[in-house]
Image: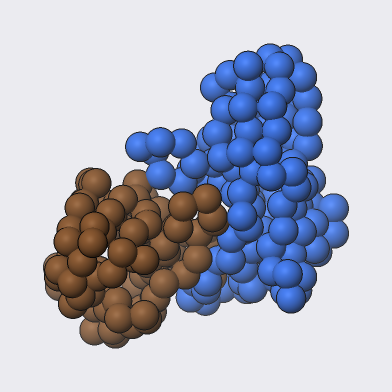
Amino acid sequence: GNSVTQMEGPVTLSEEAFLTINCTYTATGYPSLFWYVQYPGEGLQLLLKATKADDKGSNKGFEATYRKETTSFHLEKGSVQVSDSAVYFCALSGTRNTPLVFGKGTRLSVIA
Amino acid sequence: NAGVTQTPKFQVLKTGQSMTLQCAQDMNHNSMYWYRQDPGMGLRLIYYSASEGTTDKGEVPNGYNVSRLNKREFSLRLESAAPSQTSVYFCASSEAGVAGGRADTQYFGPGTRLTVL
């Protein structure tokens, strides 16, 4: 079945550092890929998504590129801020009426 | 639009008590979902409803029941709560319906923090 593996945290960075959170997937067909973010005490919200190979999703300075050859969707940001401290979830879905499959989440802490 | 709303925000139960978690969405979405979130386990799907009138089991359905009351509302019931059900519960919805095609975005509620003593 479909599955998502993302790097375990926690990840602690200084402000303005470069961020990479790795995500790889196993799926049949051509899944859509997502990154969700969860700020403390809140629900998940969509950060970015990509629906086909070589697509790049971007939002709030974060980017991720759908790499079919390496089955990956790594999240990157060039310069993190304290306000980016949150838990980040990679997810995929293969078809329109099936639920998303989530990774276990990576906690990011950014210190000033 | 309020998006996805959940009630209550917090609840403490004793072992064996029952309760229903309520979820509603105002986005006219077809599909709704219930997840639980536990430390180190990520999000696990309990039940989902691809359309009004249908429900399906997810990864961890034991000990739970659901009702898709109408297109807007999807409730989760614990008939006899156990300490293992202490968790944060999230409801989500998406536009997706029963037709095939690519996945679309799920929108999440703020969660219900449940403690079972």
Task: Indicate whether B106 appears above or below A99.
Answer: below
Q: Quadrant of the N terminus of chain B?
A: bottom right
Q: Quadrant of the C terminus of chain B?
A: top right
Residue B113 visible in rendering: yes
Q: Quadrant of residue B31?
A: bottom right
Q: Position of residue A36 (x, y in %)?
A: 42, 64
Instruction: Describe residue A11's horizontal placement relative to residue A3 as left or right.
Output: left
* Residue at 24% in and 46% down: A10
Estimate the x, y position of residue B92 in percent, counting from the top left. Answer: 61, 58
Which chain is represented by brown in the image?
A: A
Taking the image as shown, residue B10 lies to the left or right of residue A45, namely: right
- Residue A83: horizontal and vertical position, in percent? 36, 66
**Residue B51, placed above or below residue B8:** below
Q: Residue at x 40, y 36 (%)?
A: B39
Residue at 72% over, 58% down: B5
Residue sitting nearer the eye, B80 or B57: B80
Chain B color in figure? blue
The answer to which image quadrant residue A29 occupies is bottom left
Left or right: B100 with respect to A112? right
Judging depth in this view, the residue of A17 and B22 nearest the camera is A17
Which residue ends up furthest to the right in the rendered image?
A: B70
Total labels drawn = 0
